[in-house]
Amino acid sequence: MSAGPEKAAAPKPAPEVPIRAEGLTKKFGGLTAVSDVDLELRAGEIAAIIGPNGAGKTTFFNMLTGLYRPTSGRIRRGQRDITRARPDQITALGVARTFQNIRLFPTMTARQNVMIGRHSRMRAGIFGSIFRPPWVRNEEREVWERAAEELRFVGLKPELLDRPSTALSYGDQRRVEIARALASDPEILLLDEPTAGMDPRESGELADFVLRIREERKLSILLIEHDMKVVMGISDRVTVLDHGELIAEGDPAAVREDPKVIEAYLGRGATA
Ligand SMILES: Nc1ncnc2c1ncn2[C@@H]1O[C@H](COP(=O)(O)OP(=O)(O)OP(=O)(O)O)[C@@H](O)[C@H]1O
Ligand SMILES: [Mg+2]
């Protein structure tokens, strides 16, 4: 008598690691931009990735968010293997990001840009958009209001809500990008140089804001950042990449004193 179909082994209990890279590698032709990097983001933490220009930080984010397919290695979102998932699937799994080079639609208003971030959570498909039954109109109104709410949360002045995104200051455009990411209801937020182009006062405000987002939205945050004051001020843990390789990891103060890290920065004439 057959014993019936074999049961799959029960999944292991979820460790509190919302996202994890294992041996992640990306090659562009002969260049290894990211080389065998293991990195995990723990629940509720703010972790930073630092490293000189060209170290592979953005490439690492691009793999985590499905924009680049890793050459080798794995990415896990909790128990799920998302190594080959598409960007929209990864967004739907609660991973949102901002971009180093701001990517807002220039002809759209701040609010419209944030509404796009909500699309991953909308039910209306093409059918709904064309025939517009009442529930679609309700959903659109909710998205419209939710966008305003997110923009308020990130501190955009109400009078700028319906201005074209190009009319906003650089700092405000960065806020809109964060609002757009938050509109997708993420559990994990990836910020690629959120203080780029900001003066020290704005950077300080942004650092406080990142702490507030974590607190109020219960997020885990991974942040690429060049501003050491921001990194030291808000990170629980720091990972350092250099030439694609992970050269140091740990407590921010210890990492800053690590000779390998100092060498990586000074070796390129940059100041840490
Ligand atoms: N699409 C691509 N095609 C070819 N090479 C790329 C591509 N994207 C990145 N690279 C290369 O990979 C390396 C890592 O780039 P990456 O943008 O990840 O660095 P980074 O650490 O984010 O640097 P920065 O601090 O300047 O933003 C660089 O040498 C870069 O030129
Ligand atoms: Mg970068």
Image (tube, helix red, strand yellow):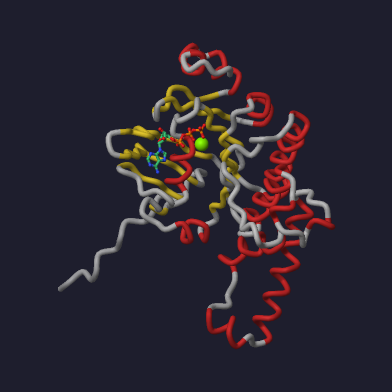
Q: Residue at x 45, y 27 (%)?
A: 241
- The C terminus: image quadrant: top right
Compared across the picture, whether 171 is left or right of 47 comes to right
Q: Residue at x 58, y 51 (%)?
A: 103
Query: Residue 163's x, y, as percent?
Result: 76, 59
Compared across the picture, whether 219 is left or right of 61 comes to right
- 262 w.r.t. 33: above or below: above
Q: Residue at x 59, y 67 (%)?
A: 119
- The N terminus: image quadrant: bottom left
Query: Residue 48's x, y, as percent?
Result: 57, 32
Closest to the observer: 153 or 264? 264
Q: Quadrant of ligand 1?
A: top left
Query: Residue 94's x, y, as percent?
Result: 55, 56
Q: How many marks?
A: 0
Closest to the observer: 221 or 260? 260
- 120 w.r.t. 186: above or below: below
Residue at the far left: name it.
1
Can residue 176 be seen in this snapshot? yes
Q: Residue at x 59, y 81 (%)?
A: 129
Query: Residue 9's x, y, as percent?
Result: 32, 56
Compared across the picture, whether 183 is left or right of 69 comes to right
Can residue 36 be seen in this snapshot? no
- 257 w.r.t. 235: above or below: above
